[in-house]
Amino acid sequence: MIPHWLLLEIGLPVEMVKLDLASREHKRPEYLALNPAGTVPTLVVGDQVITESAAILLWLVEQAPGQWLAPAMGTAQRAQFLQHVVHLANTLQPAFRRWFYPEEAAGAAAAAANKQHAERDIALEWERWNGLLAERPYLLGTDISAADFYLCVLMRWSRNMPRPATDWPHLARFAATLKARPSFALLYQREELTDWT
Ligand SMILES: N[C@@H](CCC(=O)N[C@@H](CS)C(=O)NCC(=O)O)C(=O)O
């Protein structure tokens, strides 16, 4: 969803290929040849294959006309932007991996405890991001960036958790702002989604 939403924001044409995870289409040899981790998403541009959501995000911001999805290279704001994207990719998103696949790292016997730890870690993350957004409309201040879209998609992943991200008031306001963008309605239409509107 992260690359898809950014592609819609940028207005780049893209052919979407749906994979049925339930029937393990993402573990078939044709897909593993593109993405050996057997995870989604994968972006194919000509003969170039890009995997990892955060890497795709960072590549896409370079494609946005006027590069409005990220601050200019070399600026202090750019450093903040990179910090947010890397934190989302290496701390919040992996905590979700532990929540959704608790047996993966810990083994079946430790899955319940691992899930509990993941839930606690995700809640601590919401504290962190909620605190940041208490002082500004977007992560970098008054200008939206690709990091905001990334955070919003990860917030959505918590929608069925005991404490969803929207329990935190500044995060709830932030999500409402992002969801009001026309690109969100288009994204939902294209992905045939109806929940978390
Ligand atoms: N670090 C990867 C993680 C991707 C990831 O965990 N994707 C999930 C999204 S549902 C997935 O493909 N799960 C299916 C599986 O791992 O079998 C990224 O950011 O692209």
Image (tube, rainbow, N blue to C red):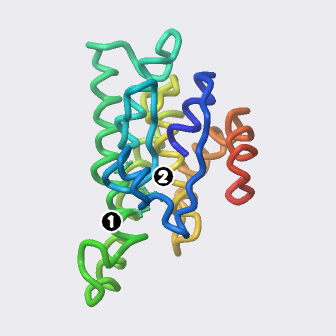
Residue kind at label 1, given as amino acid type: Asp
Say which label, 2 or 1, has the lower sequence index. Answer: 1
Tell me whether the residue at label 2 lies in contact with that at label 1, contact meaning CB atoms closer than 8 angstroms.
Answer: no
Q: Which residue does the image show at 41% across and 18% down from the upper left?
A: 62
Task: Depth check: give the residue in front, 57 or 154.
Answer: 57
Residue bearing the label numbered 1? 121
Picture coordinates of residue 115, whole percent (x, y): 36, 77
Closest to the observer: 125 or 10? Answer: 10
Q: Alpha-carbon neighbours of circle 2 within 10 Å: few (<14), some, or many (≥20)?
A: some
- Residue at image position (52%, 75%) is 162
Tell me which amino acid carries mark 2.
Leu
Q: Is mark 2 within 8 Å of ligand 1?
A: no
| 35 to 106, vertically: above or below | above
- Figure quarter occupied by ligand 1: bottom left
The dot on residue 154 is 2
- Residue pushed farthest bottom? 109
Q: Decide if residue 21 is on the left or right side of residue 103.
A: right
The tag on residue 6 is: none
Percent across and percent down for residue 158 are 52, 63
Secondary structure found at label 1: helix
* Residue at x-position 46% and y-position 58%: 26
Question: Which of the two discs, 2 and 1, sits closer to the camera?
Answer: 2
